[in-house]
Image: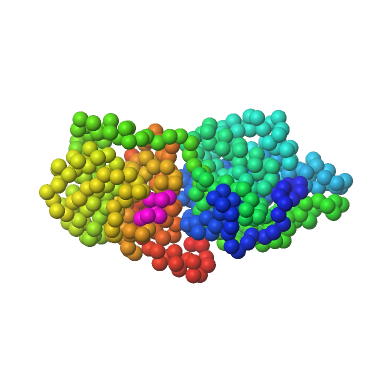
Amino acid sequence: MAENQPQTGSEALPRTKAEGGPDTWGAFRAGCEAAPLIDPARLVGEGGLVVIAPHPDDESLGAAALLIEAGRSGREVGIVALTDGDASHPNSLCVPPARLAEIRQREQEAAVAALGVTNVRWLRLRLPDRFAGRSAGFADASVKIAAFCEEVRATALSAPHPDDPHSDHHAAAALAEDVLRLRPGLRLLFHPIWSMRLGDEEPYRCDGLLPFRVGTDPDTKARAIACHRSQLGEVVADDPDGFTLPDWFLAAHRGPTEVHVWAKKPGRLPGPDHFAALYADGNDPWQAQTSSYEREKRADNIDQLQRPHYRRGLDIGCGEGRLAAELVAAGKVGAMTGLDRDPSIIARAERRYGDNGRLSFAAGTLPLDLPEGHFDCVVVSEVLYFLDEAEIAALADRMTNQLPSGADMLVVSYLGQTDTPLSGRESHDLFVACFGDRCRTISLRVRERYLAELLRFSPEDAEATADDGRAR
């Protein structure tokens, strides 16, 4: 953190009971407490990670979990240092601002190394501490960060939450949102740092943000924070009013998890008319009948389902019902229900397979029209990117009530261009993340044009994690 304490009227620690309306700190905190516990790699994706740090130390406080995972996995990392944090001790004569900036830069580099990140690039924008958002350099900073993300081959950009109580944190979040507009293929992740100072009724953005709890290594994070000696009262001795990280704040950052939220992607989804036009006049837009890709994918999917027999299955995005029919014909599943959005394609499935009593089909939208009942085998094939983030989260939530323990779910996602706000890979990762540790990966197949992940629903694993208090 830089210069002085964050701008807020509250000195209170987080309360034990959440209060407040739908866009308040209390509501946000309550959502975080109930959020899924996940592996940070699921949020970042397969590429590099860029973290915007308003001041040297914010990367260690708010994004340590992401950086620790990046170090362990060897992914590329970029750190955007928005300011040098040179205003934290304005009255010191022994350590003037220029000298303090040098000290804080070395501290930040040591902290990132302590988190295990060796493959790191730096973009130091040197905007004025406390006034980053009102400086001349702010205007083109988002363009520089967007280009930096390209250099790092980033799939994710992390920044403080837009309402984290500090003007430079607000500026960092605004830049991150501008970068997302410039590079819509990025995943934008926000994290709170000083928000625990807020009262539960204070305004705080919740809409369009999905929270997740991410497991971290408290000891490694503590070593990184310890590198920021200037902010711990260990460097500047002649400014008694200078900033020092308070003990209660440090204690709050020693926990086994961090909160990271997925920000909604810009753009619009195709509506019902789009699908009606695709299927008009018996058209087969996905070439389910003739495409070798579709035939080979169905065979691969059937092979990936490990168990010799499932009792009742659900095919979400069933189209003409060919996969459902082949699963039943192969004896893999006793009975299948297919769901698709367009009534005309469902009518086609019923005409083709309606005389088979073990196959049924329904038209409906997700997640509202998810068929009732319990399913021990679910296939979600190339449909998630036609949903937005809230719909994906709601679908996962609905499905947790319809999957018995031990049920298998095969998520198949197209890896090509989708022309939707979420790519196939992004929607895939977000959907799986929404289950948290209630699902575990059984097998993963990455083909040239699609990704297929077999998951086993194991809510008892999540209960065990909650019981022993550790992130897995």
Label the magenta part by its dominant secondary structure. helix
Residue at 23% from the left image edge and 31% from the top image edge = 280
Tell me the magenta residue range.
393-399
Is residue 397 part of the magenta span, yes or no? Answer: yes
**How far from the left and from the top, in percent, is residue 178?**
57, 34
Q: Examine the rendered structure and indicate whether residue 235 appears above or below residue 125.
A: below
Residue at 65% from the left image edge and 30% from the top image edge = 139
254 lies left or right of 424: right
Question: How many circles with numbers are drawn on the protein?
Answer: 0
**How far from the left and from the top, in percent, is residue 118?**
59, 48
Q: Examine the rendered structure and indicate whether residue 141 appears above or below residue 44.
A: above
Can residue 177 be seen?
yes
Q: In which quarter of the image is residue 449?
A: top left
> Which of the two residues, 263 or 204, is positioned nearer the viewer here?
204
Residue at 74% from the left image edge and 50% from the top image edge = 5
**How far from the left and from the top, in percent, is residue 239?**
85, 51
